[in-house]
């Protein structure tokens, strides 16, 4: 029976490994739009017209969590043990195909818990399987589970390998999970990995930092930088500010420039989303005005003051908006006075009536204003 399988083409045979592709995508693609596209080319679960690393996992994690059949988990564990303990090639093939066909974001914890329940002993064969899955296999879900296995087997020697695969956003979250199992420095390593990353791979990694890192340095980093490098800060700025406790930093007498920029991005977000509830909105806005009035007079400050002015005018007839931002009566009164005084000042009136054109992009005052606001998340 085992020989029958060996006579057939193995599911990973004669296919480009994902690890090799990630190390040198220029060798395999000529279209720069495809540099991030992994060679297994699986159908997207949440198709938005093109592939974004980790977007499918992000959507599953937040919105489409699926119930997993316990029998599936048991079968997966059976095949894993049959191969690791006895070298059964049939079991390896079935284990591989099961992983390949089902997104592990929905069940990797269940699988590891099943192994723990069975008191599976960490062996050299287990580590070797994990490394092979990461370095040699051509299917992304198999690579992800290999990363997880290296983590739970505490294979410290594989950390450079994990850092290497993590530079592709599809795998960064799983590398973060593995590093968490391996070293107390996992969170600092993960920040170094995600600094240059964009979009959902970065967002997924920031989730780990917010949920599991106890380090003050990491908390401050998440507040200042965790929301950046996304299409919009909206995707995770509220998580960064609430879980990272931005108010702790805002209550300090002096702010560093990255904190100020982060708070500006958050205030813009709050004022664009007043139909939703934000438990810290009122205090954030009050402290922002307290710190910046008389100090900031640029495009961002103009946009925030103008947005607050418009918000106050609408809120006169819709107190729900005030409640959504959790603004106390005292804070509301202070904000009202501050904003109505600020809009009368010469600097604000000058920008309000400015309608200049420029020889280089952005070409108009309004274009420049929009670009400055958009760049808050970069």
Image: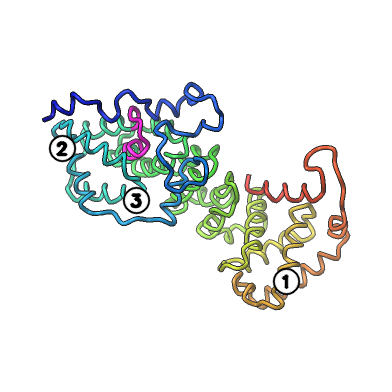
Q: Residue at x 77, y 68 (%)?
A: 338
Q: Residue 296's image quarter?
A: bottom right
| Residue to which mark 3 is pinned | 106
Residue name at image x 58 percent, y 44 percent: 229
Counting residues from the start of the chain, the first of labels 3 and 1 encountered is 3
Q: Is residue 366 above or below residue 327?
A: above
For label 2, the crowd category at 10 Å Cα-Cα, with few meaning under 14, some 14 to 19 and many 20 or more, is some
Q: How many numbered discs, if any?
A: 3
- Marked residue nearer the N-terminal end (2 or 3): 2
Residue highlighted by disc 2: 82
Tell me if label 2 and label 1 are in contact, CB under 8 Å.
Answer: no
Q: Is residue 135 magenta?
A: yes
- Residue 198 percent coordinates (x, y): 55, 41
- Spatial separation of the CA atoms under disc 3 and disc 1: 44 Å
User: How far apart are the alpha carbons under marks 2 and 3?
Assistant: 23 Å
Residue 20 at x, y percent in the picture: 41, 25
CA–CA distance in space, label 2 to label 1: 66 Å
Nearer the camera: disc 3 or disc 1: 3
Report the span colored magenta.
134-146
Task: Pick the residue in front: 234 or 30.
Answer: 30
| Residue 58: x %, y % from top left | 45, 49
The main secondary structure of the magenta stretch is: helix
Q: Residues within 10 Å of mark 3 (few under 14, many from 20)?
A: some
| Label drawn at residue 312 | 1
Q: Is residue 304 left or right of residue 323?
A: right
Q: Can you give x and y, in whole percent of width and height, for residue 83 in the image? A: 18, 34
Judge by depth and name the residue closer to the eye, 347 or 21.
21
- The image quadrant of residue 330 is bottom right
Q: Nearer the viewer, residue 235 or 293?
A: 235
Q: Quadrant of the N terminus?
A: top left
Q: First in sequence, mark 2 or 1: give its number.
A: 2
Quadrant (top left, top right, bottom left, bottom right) of the C terminus: top right
């Amino acid at each position: 029976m085992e020989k029958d399988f060996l006579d057939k083409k193995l599911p990973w045979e004669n296919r480009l490994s994902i690890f090799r592709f990630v190390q040198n995508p220029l060798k395999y693609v000529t279209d720069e739009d495809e540099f991030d596209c992994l060679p297994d080319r699986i159908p997207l679960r949440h198709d938005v017209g093109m592939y974004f690393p980790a977007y499918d996992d992000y959507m599953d994690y937040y919105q489409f969590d699926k119930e997993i059949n316990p029998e599936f988990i048991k079968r997966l564990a059976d095949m894993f043990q049959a191969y690791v303990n006895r070298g059964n090639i049939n079991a390896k093939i079935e284990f591989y195909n099961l992983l390949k066909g089902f997104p592990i974001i929905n069940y990797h914890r269940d699988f590891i818990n099943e192994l723990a329940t069975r008191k599976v002993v960490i062996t050299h064969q287990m580590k070797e399987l994990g490394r092979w899955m990461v370095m040699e296999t051509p299917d992304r879900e198999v690579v992800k589970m290999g990363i997880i296995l290296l983590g739970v087997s505490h294979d410290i020697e594989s950390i450079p390998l994990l850092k290497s695969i993590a530079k592709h956003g599809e795998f960064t979250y799983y590398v973060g999970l593995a590093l968490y199992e391996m070293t107390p420095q996992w969170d600092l390593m993960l920040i170094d990995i995600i600094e240059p990353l964009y979009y959902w791979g970065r967002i997924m990694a920031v989730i780990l930092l917010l949920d599991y890192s106890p380090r003050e340095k990491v908390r401050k980093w998440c507040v200042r930088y965790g929301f950046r490098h996304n299409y919009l800060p909206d995707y995770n700025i509220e998580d960064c500010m609430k879980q990272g406790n931005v108010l702790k930093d805002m209550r300090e007498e002096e702010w560093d420039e990255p904190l100020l920029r982060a708070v500006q991005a958050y205030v813009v977000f709050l004022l664009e989303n007043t139909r939703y509830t934000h438990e810290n909105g009122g205090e954030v806005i009050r402290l922002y005005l307290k710190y910046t009035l008389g100090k900031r007079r640029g495009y961002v400050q103009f946009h925030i003051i103008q947005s607050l002015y418009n918000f106050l005018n609408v809120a006169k007839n819709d107190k729900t908006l005030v409640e959504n931002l959790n603004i106390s009566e005292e804070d509301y009164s202070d904000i009202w006075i501050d904003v109505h005084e600020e809009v009368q000042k010469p600097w604000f009136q000058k920008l309000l009536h400015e309608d200049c054109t420029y020889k280089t992009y952005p070409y108009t005052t309004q274009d420049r204003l929009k670009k400055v606001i958009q760049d808050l998340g970069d």
